[in-house]
Protein backbone atom coordinates (compact mmCIF):
# COMPACT_ATOMS: atom_id res chain seq x y z
CA UNK A 1 0.00 0.00 0.00
CA UNK A 2 2.00 2.98 -1.26
CA UNK A 3 1.30 6.42 0.12
CA UNK A 4 0.87 9.83 -1.45
CA UNK A 5 2.43 9.99 -4.92
CA UNK A 6 2.88 6.20 -5.09
CA UNK A 7 6.20 4.42 -4.42
CA UNK A 8 8.68 4.66 -7.27
CA UNK A 9 10.90 1.95 -8.76
CA UNK A 10 13.69 2.32 -6.15
CA UNK A 11 11.36 2.49 -3.09
CA UNK A 12 11.66 -0.39 -0.62
CA UNK A 13 8.01 -1.36 -1.18
CA UNK A 14 8.59 -1.75 -4.90
CA UNK A 15 11.84 -3.67 -4.37
CA UNK A 16 10.25 -5.99 -1.80
CA UNK A 17 7.28 -6.69 -4.09
CA UNK A 18 9.65 -7.52 -6.95
CA UNK A 19 11.23 -10.21 -4.76
CA UNK A 20 7.82 -11.68 -3.92
CA UNK A 21 5.75 -12.35 -7.07
CA UNK A 22 2.82 -13.54 -4.95
CA UNK A 23 2.43 -10.13 -3.35
CA UNK A 24 -0.15 -7.69 -4.68
CA UNK A 25 0.39 -3.96 -4.92
CA UNK A 26 -2.98 -2.29 -4.47
CA UNK A 27 -3.78 0.27 -7.14
CA UNK A 28 -5.33 2.98 -4.99
CA UNK A 29 -5.42 5.57 -7.78
CA UNK A 30 -5.47 9.34 -7.46
CA UNK A 31 -1.89 9.23 -6.17
CA UNK A 32 -1.51 13.02 -6.11
CA UNK A 33 -5.02 13.90 -4.91
CA UNK A 34 -6.16 10.94 -2.79
CA UNK A 35 -9.59 10.79 -1.23
CA UNK A 36 -9.81 8.59 1.84
CA UNK A 37 -13.21 7.05 1.07
CA UNK A 38 -12.08 6.00 -2.41
CA UNK A 39 -8.83 4.56 -1.08
CA UNK A 40 -10.75 2.66 1.62
CA UNK A 41 -13.04 1.18 -1.05
CA UNK A 42 -10.04 0.15 -3.20
CA UNK A 43 -8.33 -1.48 -0.21
CA UNK A 44 -11.51 -3.25 0.87
CA UNK A 45 -12.03 -4.67 -2.62
CA UNK A 46 -8.40 -5.83 -2.77
CA UNK A 47 -8.63 -7.54 0.64
CA UNK A 48 -11.86 -9.28 -0.36
CA UNK A 49 -10.11 -10.71 -3.45
CA UNK A 50 -7.42 -12.34 -1.28
CA UNK A 51 -7.85 -16.07 -0.66
CA UNK A 52 -6.85 -15.54 2.99
CA UNK A 53 -6.48 -12.47 5.21
CA UNK A 54 -3.46 -10.50 3.91
CA UNK A 55 -0.60 -8.89 5.75
CA UNK A 56 -0.77 -5.21 4.81
CA UNK A 57 2.46 -3.29 4.14
CA UNK A 58 1.77 0.45 4.25
CA UNK A 59 3.96 3.51 3.83
CA UNK A 60 3.11 7.07 4.79
CA UNK A 61 -0.46 8.11 3.93
CA UNK A 62 -1.39 4.46 3.44
CA UNK A 63 -0.87 3.99 7.20
CA UNK A 64 -3.80 6.35 7.80
CA UNK A 65 -5.68 4.46 5.09
CA UNK A 66 -5.23 1.21 7.03
CA UNK A 67 -6.59 2.83 10.21
CA UNK A 68 -9.64 4.20 8.36
CA UNK A 69 -10.22 0.89 6.57
CA UNK A 70 -9.94 -1.10 9.81
CA UNK A 71 -12.50 1.15 11.51
CA UNK A 72 -15.09 0.37 8.78
CA UNK A 73 -14.19 -2.97 7.21
CA UNK A 74 -15.93 -6.26 7.62
CA UNK A 75 -13.12 -8.11 5.81
CA UNK A 76 -10.12 -9.27 7.83
CA UNK A 77 -6.40 -8.64 7.64
CA UNK A 78 -3.71 -10.87 9.13
CA UNK A 79 -1.69 -7.86 10.29
CA UNK A 80 -0.20 -4.53 9.25
CA UNK A 81 3.34 -3.21 8.85
CA UNK A 82 2.95 0.57 9.10
CA UNK A 83 5.91 2.77 8.15
CA UNK A 84 6.33 6.56 8.51
CA UNK A 85 2.88 7.70 9.65
CA UNK A 86 2.20 11.25 8.41
CA UNK A 87 0.74 13.83 10.76
CA UNK A 88 -2.30 15.77 9.53
CA UNK A 89 -2.12 19.48 10.21
CA UNK A 90 1.63 19.73 9.73
CA UNK A 91 3.11 21.84 6.90
CA UNK A 92 4.30 18.74 5.02
CA UNK A 93 0.93 16.92 5.08
CA UNK A 94 -0.31 16.78 1.46
CA UNK A 95 -2.92 19.52 1.03
CA UNK A 96 -4.58 17.56 -1.79
CA UNK A 97 -5.27 14.53 0.47
CA UNK A 98 -8.87 14.71 1.65
CA UNK A 99 -10.91 12.81 4.22
CA UNK A 100 -7.99 11.37 6.21
CA UNK A 101 -8.84 13.36 9.35
CA UNK A 102 -9.65 12.77 12.05
CA UNK A 103 -7.31 9.80 12.29
CA UNK A 104 -9.12 6.80 13.83
CA UNK A 105 -7.65 6.18 17.26
CA UNK A 106 -9.21 2.85 18.17
CA UNK A 107 -7.39 -0.50 18.38
CA UNK A 108 -6.76 -2.28 15.11
CA UNK A 109 -8.41 -5.72 15.00
CA UNK A 110 -5.14 -7.40 13.94
CA UNK A 111 -1.47 -7.36 15.01
CA UNK A 112 0.49 -4.38 13.79
CA UNK A 113 3.92 -2.81 13.88
CA UNK A 114 4.59 0.90 13.49
CA UNK A 115 8.06 1.93 12.30
CA UNK A 116 8.97 5.57 12.92
CA UNK A 117 11.86 7.99 12.65
CA UNK A 118 12.90 10.87 14.92
CA UNK A 119 13.35 13.25 11.98
CA UNK A 120 10.49 12.40 9.63
CA UNK A 121 9.44 15.71 8.02
CA UNK A 122 5.91 14.35 7.45
CA UNK A 123 5.16 13.25 11.02
CA UNK A 124 6.66 13.47 14.47
CA UNK A 125 7.82 10.52 16.51
CA UNK A 126 5.32 11.58 19.20
CA UNK A 127 2.48 11.34 16.66
CA UNK A 128 3.62 7.88 15.55
CA UNK A 129 3.81 6.77 19.18
CA UNK A 130 0.30 8.13 19.91
CA UNK A 131 -1.09 6.26 16.91
CA UNK A 132 0.74 3.06 17.85
CA UNK A 133 -0.56 3.26 21.41
CA UNK A 134 -4.15 3.88 20.28
CA UNK A 135 -4.00 1.18 17.62
CA UNK A 136 -2.46 -1.42 19.94
CA UNK A 137 0.64 -1.54 17.74
CA UNK A 138 4.21 -2.16 18.71
CA UNK A 139 6.25 0.93 17.83
CA UNK A 140 9.89 0.79 16.71
CA UNK A 141 11.92 4.01 16.56
CA UNK A 142 14.70 3.51 14.01
CA UNK A 143 16.43 6.82 14.79
CA UNK A 144 17.30 9.45 12.23
CA UNK A 145 15.81 7.86 9.12
CA UNK A 146 13.80 10.69 7.59
CA UNK A 147 10.61 9.57 5.87
CA UNK A 148 11.99 6.05 5.40
CA UNK A 149 11.96 6.30 1.63
CA UNK A 150 14.41 6.58 -1.25
CA UNK A 151 15.18 10.24 -0.48
CA UNK A 152 16.31 9.27 3.03
CA UNK A 153 18.52 6.46 1.74
CA UNK A 154 16.11 3.55 2.22
CA UNK A 155 16.16 1.68 -1.08
CA UNK A 156 16.04 -2.06 -0.37
CA UNK A 157 15.88 -1.31 3.41
CA UNK A 158 17.16 -4.65 4.66
CA UNK A 159 16.70 -3.68 8.33
CA UNK A 160 13.04 -2.92 7.64
CA UNK A 161 12.54 -6.29 6.01
CA UNK A 162 13.86 -7.94 9.18
CA UNK A 163 11.24 -6.02 11.19
CA UNK A 164 8.59 -7.12 8.70
CA UNK A 165 9.66 -10.74 9.16
CA UNK A 166 9.24 -10.33 12.93
CA UNK A 167 5.64 -9.23 12.37
CA UNK A 168 5.07 -12.21 10.06
CA UNK A 169 6.08 -14.55 12.86
Image (cartoon, rainbow, N blue to C red):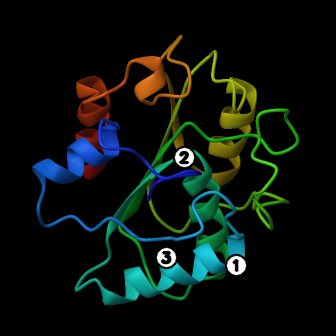
Q: Secondary structure at mark 3?
A: helix
Q: Position of residue 145 (x, y in %)?
A: 50, 17
Q: Classify 10 Å Cα crowding around label 1: few (below 14), some (14-19), many (20 and above).
A: some
Q: Secondary structure at mark 1?
A: helix
Residue 152 appearing in the image: yes
**Of callouts 1 and 3, the N-terminal one:** 1
**Where is mark 3, residue-wise?**
43
Q: Residue at x 36, y 24 (%)?
A: 154
Q: Residue at x 25, y 35 (%)?
A: 161
Residue 169 appearing in the image: no
Most foreground residue, 157 or 10: 10
Q: Classify 10 Å Cα crowding around label 3: few (below 14), some (14-19), many (20 and above).
A: many
Q: Is residue 40 above or below residue 55?
A: below
Q: Residue at x 69, y 32 (%)?
A: 122
Splitting the image into 4 quarters, where does residue 12 fall? top left
Most foreground residue, 141 or 149: 149
Q: Classify 10 Å Cα crowding around label 2: few (below 14), some (14-19), many (20 and above).
A: many
Q: CA distance from mark 2 to mark 3?
A: 20 Å
Q: Position of residue 8 (x, y in %)?
A: 38, 44
Which mark is on residue 123?
none
**Where is mark 1, residue-wise?**
37
Q: Is residue 74 left or right of residue 87?
A: left
Q: Is residue 106 above or below residue 39?
A: above
Which mark is on residue 137?
2
The residue positioned farthest toward the top in the image shown: 144
Marks 2/3 in contact by CB < 8 Å: the verdict is no
Residue depth check, mark 2 versus mark 1: number of the one nearer the observer: 1
Q: CA distance from mark 1 to mark 3?
A: 10 Å
Q: Position of residue 98 (x, y in %)?
A: 79, 64
Q: Is residue 136 left or right of residue 77?
A: right
Q: Is residue 31 left or right of residue 93?
A: left
Amino acid sequence: LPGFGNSGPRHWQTLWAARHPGWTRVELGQWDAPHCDQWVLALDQAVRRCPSPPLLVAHSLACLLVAHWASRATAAAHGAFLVAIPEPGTPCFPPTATGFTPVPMSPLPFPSLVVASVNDPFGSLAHAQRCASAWGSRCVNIGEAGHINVESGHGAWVEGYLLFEELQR
